[in-house]
């Protein structure tokens, strides 16, 4: 059984910073891409940033220069450092990991963590 658990969301003022963390655990053989997605009220889920197991990262234009994705393979953890937050960053943030177990390879999602940017 595999679990993906996010943490670090909360309420922050415009211009502030937050660091999200996501840890995978369970019967994991290998983790490929890990990423962060977000879904604002009334909108579709969108990609924020993705990082490969080798450390190559890409991020959405809307967060470029403000958000940095990183990972610690030994800890099976991915992070999202968000700076200069704006009201439009308000959303539920979801972690995704492409995980290989002994029986299958698939996408695993966390339960989501709320980020609210408001004064």
Image (cartoon, rainbow, N blue to C red):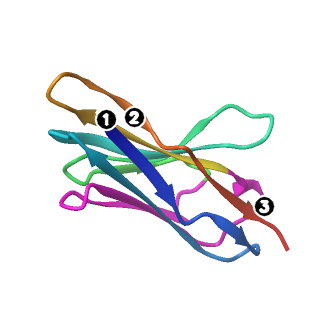
The residue at 40%/46% (across/down) is 4
| CA gap, disc 3 and disc 1 | 30 Å
Residue density around tag 2, few if under 14, some if 14–19, many if 20 or more, within 10 Å: some
SS class of the residue under badge 1? Answer: strand
For residue 60, above or below residue 46: below
- Say whether disc 2 or disc 3 marks the residue closer to the N-terminus: 3
Asked whether disc 2 touches disc 3, contact meaning CB atoms under 8 Å apart, the reply is no
SS class of the residue under badge 2? Answer: strand
For discs 2 and 3, the disc positioned in front in the rendered view = 2
Classify residue 25 as left or right of residue 113.
left
Where is residue 112? Give x, y as percent: 58, 47
Q: Which residue is the site of mark 2?
A: 108
Picture quadrant where residue 34 is located:
top left
Residue 75: within the magenta? yes
For residue 23, above or below residue 105: below
Quadrant where the N terminus lies?
top left
Q: Which residue is the site of mark 3?
A: 87
The residue at 27%/51% (across/down) is 56
Classify residue 112 as left or right of residue 97.
right
| CA gap, disc 2 and disc 3 | 28 Å
Q: Magenta stretch?
A: 63-91
Q: Which residue is the site of mark 1?
A: 98
Residue 76: within the magenta? yes
- Say whether disc 1 or disc 2 marks the residue closer to the N-terminus: 1
SS class of the residue under badge 3? Answer: helix
Asked whether disc 1 touches disc 2, contact meaning CB atoms under 8 Å apart, the reply is yes
Task: Please tell me how many numbered marks the rendered image carries.
Answer: 3
| CA gap, disc 1 and disc 2 | 6 Å
């Amino acid at each position: 059984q595999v679990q993906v658990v996010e943490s670090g969301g909360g309420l922050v003022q415009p211009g502030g910073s937050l660091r999200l963390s996501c840890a995978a655990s369970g019967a994991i053989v290998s983790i490929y891409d890990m990423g962060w997605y977000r879904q604002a009220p009334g909108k579709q889920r969108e990609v924020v940033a993705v990082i490969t197991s080798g450390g190559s990262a890409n991020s959405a234009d809307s967060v470029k220069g403000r958000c940095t994705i990183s990972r610690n393979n030994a800890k099976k953890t991915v992070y999202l450092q968000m700076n200069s937050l704006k009201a439009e960053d308000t959303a539920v943030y979801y972690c995704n990991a492409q995980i290989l177990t002994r029986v299958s390879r698939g996408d695993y999602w966390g339960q989501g963590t709320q980020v609210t940017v408001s004064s």
